[in-house]
Image (cartoon, rainbow, N blue to C red):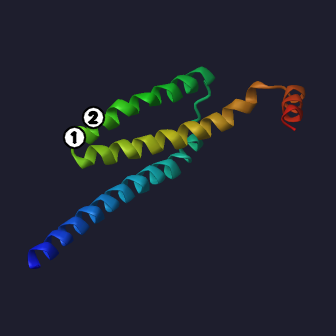
């Protein structure tokens, strides 16, 4: 009976470690996203084409995450989550600031009216 209790404790520890690990990954993503939303105050990337290419290049995170999950240590996964959050915050803020600049006032009003 005691051996079964010890096995149950090990399973609980494994589940708790997995929950803690995922909690840290989500917290790092959110921290990177939150902090990097203030980076455009220092440097705003004005090129629409450059922003578009940067957003598309974020697809390269997928093989990096797969490789890190299979072969690398947990620190690399933490770094990837932090950098994914940082690129998300910075690029989305830059896009929201740069995108409306390409339209005149009359075009902007036409776009707004077409949404209604």
Q: Viewer-proximal residue, 114 or 5?
A: 5
Residue that label 1 marks: 72
Coordinates of residue 112 in the picture (x, y in percent)? 85, 35
Q: Viewer-proximal residue, 88 or 25?
A: 25
Coordinates of residue 115 in the picture (x, y in percent)? 84, 35
Separation of residues labelled 2 and 1 (CA atoms): 7 Å
Mark 2 residue crowding within 10 angstroms, few (<14) / some (14–19) / many (20+): few
Q: Residue at x 31, y 45 (%)?
A: 77
Q: Viewer-proximal residue, 99 or 6?
A: 6
Mark 1 residue crowding within 10 angstroms, few (<14) / some (14–19) / many (20+): few
Could you tell me how many numbered marks the image carries?
2
Q: Is residue 7 above or below residue 26?
A: below
Residue that label 2 marks: 67
Q: Report the side of 17 relative to 93 (left or right).
A: left
Q: Residue at x 34, y 61 (%)?
A: 19
Which element type, helix, strand or loop, lies under badge 1?
Answer: loop
Q: Report the side of 17 relative to 92 (left or right).
A: left
Q: Report the side of 15 relative to 60 (left or right).
A: left
Q: Quadrant of residue 71?
A: top left
- The label shown at residue 107 is none
Q: Residue at x 48, y 53 (%)?
A: 30
Q: Is residue 70 above or below residue 3?
A: above
- In what quadrant of the picture does the C terminus appear? top right
Which element type, helix, strand or loop, lies under badge 2?
Answer: helix
**Furthest residue to the front?**
1
Q: Is residue 49 above or below residue 105?
A: above
Q: Are marks 2 and 1 in contact (CB under 8 Å)?
A: yes
- In what quadrant of the picture does the N terminus appear? bottom left
Of the numbered discs 2 and 1, the one sitting upstream in the chain is 2
Coordinates of residue 67 in the picture (x, y in percent)? 27, 34
């Amino acid at each position: 009976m005691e051996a079964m209790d010890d096995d149950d404790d090990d399973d609980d520890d494994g589940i708790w470690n997995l929950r803690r690990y995922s909690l840290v990954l989500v917290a790092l993503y959110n921290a990177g996203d939150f902090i990097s939303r203030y980076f455009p105050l220092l440097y705003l990337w004005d090129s629409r084409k450059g922003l578009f290419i940067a957003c598309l290049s974020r697809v390269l995170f997928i093989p990096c995450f797969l490789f890190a999950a299979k072969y690398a240590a947990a620190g690399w996964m933490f770094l990837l989550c932090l950098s994914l959050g940082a690129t998300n915050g910075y690029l989305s803020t830059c896009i929201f600031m740069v995108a409306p600049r390409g339209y005149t006032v009359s075009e902007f009003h036409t776009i707004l009216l077409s949404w209604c």
